[in-house]
Image (cartoon, helix red, strand yellow):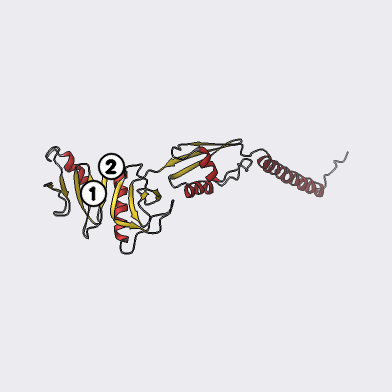
Amino acid sequence: MARQRRHPRSKRRRGRFRGLYKLLSILLIAAAGVLACVVFFRVNSVEVTGNVRYTAAEVIAASGIEMGDNLVVLPRSRVSAAICANLPYVESVSVKKALPDGVVLVVTERVAAASVESAEGRWLVSAQGKLLELDKGAVETIRITGLTAVGPYPGGMIQAAEGQEATLRYVGELLGELEARGLLAQCTALDCSAATSMTLDWGIYRVKLPRGGDYSYYLSLTQAALDSGKLPEGVPGTLDLTITEGKVNFKTEK
């Protein structure tokens, strides 16, 4: 009995059908996934952690998140930026999705490092130069003189008066180093009015620093002098770093 041959054309047709079935299956699965994301993954709860100065309701309102928003396409970077822009004391926000319907906002707040003069009164400012609010005297910070903020507003970066741009840069570098070393609370005032130096009130001492330079190095020299045990105990004085490079000169107050 003769064997029946399969026609090559029918084989090609079945191959095309199998490819079409696979494509349709992939499209159906993708459509089902998109439909599930649109229908089921909707924001139903927002949790806020790490907030101290602001209430959870204030943080959520600043975020722009609404109940029912699509969780899958929630723009996390935009949410974080909105909160930081609207709430000056917020330094950063981590936006986490808690499937299937939750959002967690992890807030890191900044602290006021100093207060600076302006035409409207003194303003609280962070170590990074962000203006926080008018100083109401409720918190103790480093009181800066010899530097004036121009056009201040909450959440904006400090802008110095004409001719004080270099002073602002030096102050920012010094405040950053003080914050990094956890020394902000030990200092009470910073006088920037001199032409070649800045004077920092540090406990019972006045520390005379050069205008510009390596403030990390200057603070290391100062801390070494304070920890050396060579200073008269309990005697106020000036630690001068402007006379001899790399050396701290101590002079008692008269």
Q: Quadrant of the N terminus?
A: top right
Residue type at the position of mark 2: Leu
In space, the residues marked 2 and 1 are separated at their CA atoms by 12 Å
Residue at left offset 16%, top offset 54%: 245
Residue 200 image label: 1
Residue 65 image label: none
Q: Relative to 83, say whether 98 is above or below.
A: above
For marks 2 and 1, give the one nearer the viewer: 1
Give residue 197's quadrant in the image.
bottom left
For marks 2 and 1 on the same chain, the one whose residue lies earlier in the sequence: 2
- Where residue 110 appears, x then y in whole percent? 40, 43
Residue at left offset 72%, top offset 46%: 23
- Left or right relative to 96: residue 35: right
Query: Which element type, helix, strand or loop, lies under badge 2?
Result: loop
Q: Nearer the viewer, residue 151 or 159?
A: 151
Q: Nearer the viewer, residue 117 or 155?
A: 117
Q: Which residue is mark 2?
A: 183
- Where residue 7 appears, x then y in whole percent? 83, 47
Residue type at the position of mark 1: Leu
- Left or right relative to 215: residue 14: right
- Where residue 78 appears, x then y in whole percent? 53, 49
Residue extending furthest bottom?
Answer: 162
Q: Nearer the viewer, residue 162 or 97?
A: 162
Residue at left offset 33%, top offset 49%: 115
